[in-house]
């Protein structure tokens, strides 16, 4: 069938909306009419070329929710009419990582940026002239109707508004899990969150839910510092120097228990600043992305690592298990514990994707959402 979607033709480039053809679902696949998609910074990394992909043109979007319109065979009970949230990291359910409770590291993730299906080198989207179009994470939520693997879908209750449920498919779980899972925030801890965007604001929420006594949000943009305090930050400052001084003041000079790096584009010096801000046996959580080809050494003292037992912990999707964590986060939303509606600063149409990313770069929004209906 014919649909519309936002693509980049090359990188660096900008998203433009074009007419596309989308394949019918095959065995193990479903077709979904999108309701909403978050504008995550990772899709901007695709446009800038920080994250190269295997197929251009490339249709963006990986944080989305919609309604199943068609289902192939062997879709694990997912059927037409079901509401689904996409997990940008697929889960096969039986590899070493899925079997040991680390679904975010599923072996299927190796093919996320290829643009094709992980099991065979074809795409499910094409330009009208037949040119293959790559799918972001195999889902491409910047497309009105998309065909995806059932390994990338989580069925969710019908009473949850999909306009906000889409956010748990990436930003909420990544930020919340960076604090709760990767950072190991505990009651009484002092936590620094470096960078308050769509991920950082949820790291603040996660730290608050885990019981941190002091949550220090760091961002040069006043609007984002104000927002952080609405989501649980006890303090909000412009620089890491201020945050480090505050953390040391709260802890008799020791430093933060964990510093979570959720800036828009990571640089090696940010890791060095974070290491200087934490206590002995503290943790630096690296969640942010940048140029994935950058191999610049980190300005980190090895003595700090060995003698002070400091730890640098990477965090992919907040070390989540999507099939469980997406549903429990929606339960937290339903019970009034997790804020989702408040995360959305502005809604956009599909044709306004480029404007949404400009607003993100200008520091005007926490999270923009494309609404299709």
Image (tube, rainbow, N blue to C red):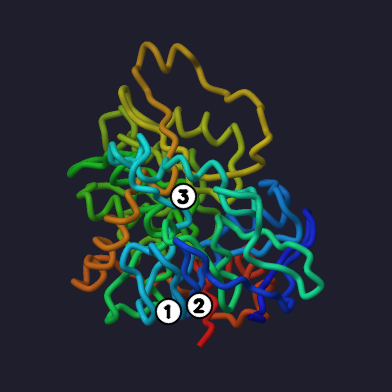
Label drawn at residue 67: 1
**Residue that badge 2 annotates:** 34
Answer with the quarter of the image where residue 249 lies.
top left
**Position of residue 4 measured from the top left corner of the image (x, y, whole percent):** 66, 79
**Position of residue 183 measured from the top left corner of the image (x, y, whole percent):** 33, 39
For the residues labelled 3 and 2, the Cα–Cα distance comes to 34 Å
Judge whether 287 appears above or below 59 on screen: above
Judge whether 261 appears above or below 252 on screen: below
Could you tell me which quadrant the N terminus lies in? bottom right
Answer with the quarter of the image where residue 293 lies.
top right
Residue under the point 42% across and 70% down: 166
Dot 3 and dot 1 residues touching (CB under 8 Å): no
Question: Which secondary structure lies at badge 1?
Answer: strand
For the residues labelled 1 and 2, the Cα–Cα distance comes to 7 Å
User: Which is nearer the N-term, disc 3 or disc 2?
Assistant: 2
Label drawn at residue 218: 3
**Position of residue 150 measured from the top left corner of the image (x, y, whole percent):** 42, 61
Disc 3 crowd, CA 10 A, few/some/many (<14, 14-19, 20+): many
Dot in front, 3 or 1 = 1
Question: Which secondary structure lies at badge 3?
Answer: strand
């Amino acid at each position: 069938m014919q649909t519309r979607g936002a693509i980049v033709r090359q990188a660096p480039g900008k998203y433009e909306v074009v007419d596309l053809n989308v394949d019918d679902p095959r065995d193990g696949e479903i077709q979904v009419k999108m309701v909403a998609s978050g504008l995550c910074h990772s899709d901007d990394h695709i446009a800038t070329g920080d994250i190269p992909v295997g197929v251009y043109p490339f249709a963006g979007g990986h944080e989305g929710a919609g309604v199943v319109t068609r289902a192939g065979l062997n879709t694990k009970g997912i059927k037409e009419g079901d509401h689904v949230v996409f997990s940008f990291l697929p889960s096969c359910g039986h590899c070493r990582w899925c079997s040991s409770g680390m679904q975010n590291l599923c072996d299927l993730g190796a093919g996320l940026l290829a643009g094709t299906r992980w099991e065979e080198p074809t795409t499910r989207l094409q330009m009208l002239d037949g040119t293959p179009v790559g799918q972001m994470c195999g889902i491409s939520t910047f497309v009105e109707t998309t065909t995806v693997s059932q390994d990338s879908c989580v069925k969710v209750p019908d009473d949850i508004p999909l306009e906000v449920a889409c956010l748990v498919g990436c930003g909420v779980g990544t930020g919340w899990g960076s604090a709760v899972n990767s950072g190991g925030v505990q009651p009484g801890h002092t936590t620094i969150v470096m960078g308050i965007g769509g991920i950082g604001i949820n790291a603040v929420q996660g730290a608050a839910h885990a019981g941190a006594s002091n949550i220090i949000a760091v961002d040069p943009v006043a609007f984002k510092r104000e927002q952080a305090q609405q989501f649980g930050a006890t303090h909000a400052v412009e620089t890491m120097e201020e945050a480090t001084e505050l953390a040391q003041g709260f802890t008799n000079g020791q430093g933060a228990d964990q510093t979570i790096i959720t800036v828009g584009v990571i640089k090696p010096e940010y890791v060095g600043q974070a290491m200087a801000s934490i206590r002995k046996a503290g943790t630096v959580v690296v969640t942010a992305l940048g140029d994935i080809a950058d191999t610049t050494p980190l300005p980190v003292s090895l003595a700090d690592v060995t003698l002070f037992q400091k730890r640098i912990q990477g965090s992919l999707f907040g070390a989540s298990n999507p099939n469980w964590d997406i549903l429990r986060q929606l339960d937290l939303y339903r019970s009034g514990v997790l804020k989702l509606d408040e995360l959305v600063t502005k809604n956009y149409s599909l044709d306004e994707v480029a404007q949404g990313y400009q607003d993100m770069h200008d520091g005007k929004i926490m999270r923009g959402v494309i609404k299709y209906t």
